[in-house]
Amino acid sequence: MRDAVIVEAVRTPIGKGKPNGALHDVHAVDLLAHSLRAVVDRSGIDPALIDDVIGGIVTQVGEQGSNMARRAALAAGYPESVPATTVDRQCGSSQQAIHFAAQGVISGAYDIAVAAGVESMGRIPMGANMVGFGDPSGVGFTERYPEGLVSQGISAELIAARWGLTRSQLDEFALGSHEKAALATKNGSFTAQLAPLNGLETDEGIRVGSTLETLGKLRPAYYDEAMAARFPEIGWQITAASASQVSDGSAAVLIMTSERARELGLTPLARVHSFAVAGDDPLLMLTAVIPATQKVLHRAGLRLSDIDLVEINEAFSPVVLSWAKDTGADLSRVNVNGGAIALGHPLGASGARLATTLVHAMRERGARYGLQTMCEAGGLANATIYERL
């Protein structure tokens, strides 16, 4: 029976998605090309062997538009014979790319594939692909949701209210993310996965020295008078500290069969054990990680207690905390090296970034099973289980 294994996983350090960010001047094509080149160079394979490159990008407009993954593969020096395509499952785009690559390898459609992702949020602002095009929803969708959906910030506030999460809980979680990321950086836990770029050698958004008192002085980031009237239950708990950072970065994962890996003399980091995707209420938007986790565990024949390490995207503190409440997860096993609140969230890159961070942490800590899941706009979530071989 064919399987799919990850033999290499790399990422750029994550830069601040601002004009003064370290990666701001790197064209998005070159940003993705850097990880595509690094994943091949580190594995030592001939890139002509790659059957497909699948790249996740969210804001597909301008330099990130028109199947940018193909331009990035060519910019990385891949032979012209190597095809590439671009996918969009919002924040989970490059995790979906991993699913597609693994499914292709397992089915026999591919022997070797690269799953990758990128987002240059400083150069291509989030939502830029939706500007100037009128009504994006049409008649049927509007009839189904006549009051309209809301922004992710409001969804996060609704989750905090529904799960009874306090401001201090959200701030404490955010502070812990920075502390763990700073310690992982200091201890060299990220070194093997990083491909430095443009003088940036470590993740740019990690902050040290903050306190709960300092975070407690920040104002709510998403207060809106109309939303306050529509949703009086919202306590306006979320600040810039408990939300993920706007970021620039890319990541790439090399996937093949274990048989092909042996032929090439490569040692897998992990096997792609099981995968699932789930949908949930698009108003709450960010809660599908809960059914996605249940679905992938069922498919794997595992319980959450069997999972040694978890990477769940820290889009907002309440996403992780509500998920933990419903699943009963042990938070000491979750995002052990920090998450998007500290490291950043370069949308299309984050799925591959989480996978990269997870499989390297599994090797470092001797973990057998790792779970990756992330919320996505529209009430979606991917979930993947990896097994260290």
Image: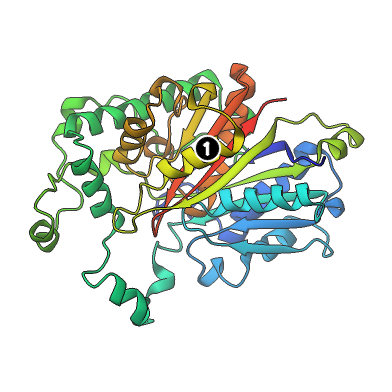
Residue under the point 83% across and 51% down: 47
Residue under the point 43% across and 35% down: 339
Left or right: residue 340 compared with residue 284: right
Residue under the point 36% across and 46% down: 287
Reading the image, the residue beneath label 1 is 372
Q: How is the image coloured?
A: rainbow
Q: Is residue 273 depicted above or below 59 in this figure?
A: above
Report whether residue 61 is seen: yes
Residue at the far right: name it: 263
* Snapshot quadrant of residue 315: top left
Q: How many marks?
A: 1
Q: Is residue 128 depicted above or below 351 in this figure?
A: below
Indicate the amino acid at tag 1: Gln
Q: Position of residue 368 (x, y in %)?
A: 63, 22
Left or right: residue 178 compared with residue 90: left
Q: Position of residue 66 (x, y in %)?
A: 60, 73
Instruction: Choose between 102 and 212: the one closer to the eye.
Output: 102
- Quarter of the picture containing the N terminus is top right
Local packing at callout 1 (Cα closer than 10 Å; few below 14, some 14-19, many 20+) is many
Left or right: residue 237 compared with residue 55: left
Report whether residue 201 is seen: no
Instruction: Choose between 379 and 115: the one closer to the eye.
Output: 379
Q: Is residue 332 depicted above or below 324 in this figure?
A: above
Q: Position of residue 288 (x, y in %)?
A: 40, 48
Q: Position of residue 309 (x, y in %)?
A: 52, 25
